[in-house]
Image (tube, coloured by chain):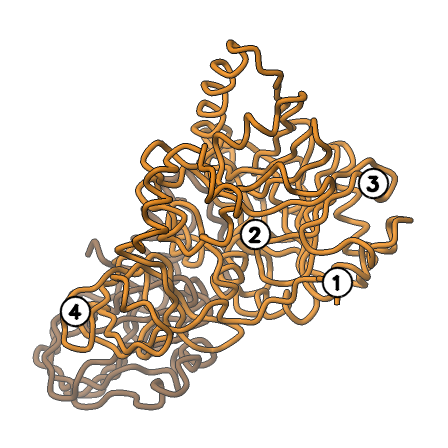
Chain colours: A brown, B orange
Amino acid sequence: MASSRLFWASRAASYLKISVFHRGFSTVLKDLKYADTHEWVKIDGASAIVGITDHAQDHLGDVVYVELPEVGAAVTQGSSFGAVESVKATSDIISPISGKVVGVNEELNNSPGLVNSSPYEDGWIIKVEVSDANEAKTLMGADDYSKFCEEEDAKH
Amino acid sequence: MRGGGLWQLGQSISRRLAQADKKAVARRCFASEADLKKTVLYDFHVAHGAKMVPFAGWSMPIQYKDSIMDSTVNCRENGSLFDVSHMCGLSLKGKDCIPFLEKLVIADVATLAPGTGTLSVFTNEKGGAIDDSVITKVKDDHIYLVVNAGCRDKDLAHIEEHMKAFKAKGGDVSWHIHDERSLLALQGPLAAPALQHLTKEDLSKIYFSDFRIIDINGASCFLTRTGYTGEDGFEISVPSEHAVDLAKAILEKSEGKVRLTGLGARDSLRLEAGLCLYGNDMEQHITPVEAGLTWAIGKRRRAEGGFLGAEKILKQLEEGPKIRRAGFISSGPPARSHSEIQNDKGANIGEVTSGGFSPCLKKNIAMGYVKSGSHKAGTKVKILVRGKAYDGVVTKMPFVPTKYYKPS
């Protein structure tokens, strides 16, 4: 998971010996599952919606471009399917779940800032037909994810 | 994560605004942060919510509470105050300081009027750029110049080596490194009105590239009407014990409209203004001609040469350089440094050296080097980002019109 955006930032920060302070008011939603690479997935039966978390968008700053996959593309848990660009940063988006892309948020082509203003609603990124629902068990719940973010911040 | 670098890092982490017990966190995890040099404004930055990052051996603010987007736009609409004390101010003194300096730079220093300056380049034997620098003639036996923080050691060693040889032959030159001073850059439309409150000198008589030693807010300052944003503005070298008071006074006199601005927005601003960042857009192997700085080679210098690498540079002027720096506007994701540039047939013609999203134009802008012939405005190119080719077009720089204060 070396390509995770925040893992990268933290690691770089650690390498460069920068202090990174905990911000601590990012929103986390109860009914979602979270990856340690800061994507969320909302699973409803065999279909799932994927986006990046409030914590992630907050760290990235103003999102100016979202690179979306094609509908029909396969995504794999732990692999990159697209990218988010902010004024100065480029970050991969890692899929929290495997399956087939059945929809992409076309709104982001014209309004990439939705990822900042509404990371869990209007700023969703892809819809996936889930191939293995068991994968969700490897993801974090809301409480664990909040704790994970706190720990990650405190570490650096 | 692809294409790491300071700016990416800064932006990724900079939104974590300081909170809670900063000092405890710092003590616990970052004992070695002490290795970084701090400007006298360090505590002032932290108190204003700055996100500090390492830059050229210094702990510098990359961003304050505003986003880089807002901060960039505010500079052009109102104004920005930057702490650039990490940069190295240097005075060369002595009756031969001009002939000495002219061996090292491409500028026609002799012809500069006292109290004026110019952007110039230190060259090496091969005509490549050692650094860029704003050089000011204070008077005939005193030159003041500012070099990049990241090039300080290299530049000083280079100057010192040549100074020894020059003095050995009887030349009269000495230097003073202004480590007792701090450097503030005040930029944007409110720069002059805000600063006018703090000095009795009539700033309307001081034009772009002019230099004065004047009293500002009770301290004797070196004032240069210059900057790195494309806006009107000043760089103020102030005795370090007066730097915090001056910063406070400037913010106060602008009624909060001039905001503290970090290196993140500074990079967006200089890119919009088409200005080179040494280390990205200019390097040891790039000549001033290739970098599009031919205008900075004085007419007399073109005729006489006499600076390091002159032979190669003058030959290039005659024959034309093989590569040139050009600006680009592109579709799709912003191009970043090292993105490949292709012609419309898909052949490689060069590489991006700086790129990003322009907060003021709301477009992707970039600069880079392409083969001569492909550098003309309007030329269609492809820029590769993550393996995909996106349409781009060579665009005249500056991307955002400059607003230097010149006599009308």
Q: Residues within 10 Å of mark 1 (few under 14, many from 20)?
A: few
Asked if badges 1 and 3 are on one and the same chain, I answer yes
For disc 4, the neighbor class at 10 Å (few under 14, some 14 to 19, many from 20) is few
- Considering every residue shown, the one lying at the far front of the view is B303
Residue depicted at x 52% and y 48%: B299
Q: Nearer the viewer, mark 4 or mark 1?
A: 1
Marks 3 and 2 sit apart, C-alpha to C-alpha, by 37 Å
Distance (Cα) linking label 2 and label 4 = 38 Å
Mark 3: secondary structure? strand
* Comes first in the chain, label 3 or label 4: 3
The answer, for residue B1, to whether it is visible in the render is: no
| Residue B154 position in % (x across, y down) | 43, 28
Between discs 4 and 1, the one toward the N terminus? 4
Of labels 3 and 2, earlier in sequence is 2
Q: Decide if residue B243 is on the left or right side of residue B73.
A: right
Give the spatial CA distance, label 4 vs label 1: 48 Å
- Same chain, labels 3 and 2: yes
Identify the residue position indicated by label 3 in the image: B214
Q: Chain of mark 3?
A: B
At x 45%, y 33%, the residue is B307
Nearer to us in this view, A106 or B115: B115
Q: Nearer the viewer, residue B347 or A151?
A: B347
Residue B18: mark: 2
Whether A73 is drawn above or below B175: the answer is below
Confirm or deny contact between disc 1 and disc 3 (CB under 8 A). Answer: no
Of callouts 1 and 3, the N-terminal one: 3
Residue A101 % position (x, y) = 16, 85
Is there a contact, CB below 8 Å, between mark 4 and mark 1? Answer: no
In the structure shown, which secondary structural element does the residue marked by tag 4 occupy?
loop
Q: State which mark lies toward you, 1 or 2.
A: 1
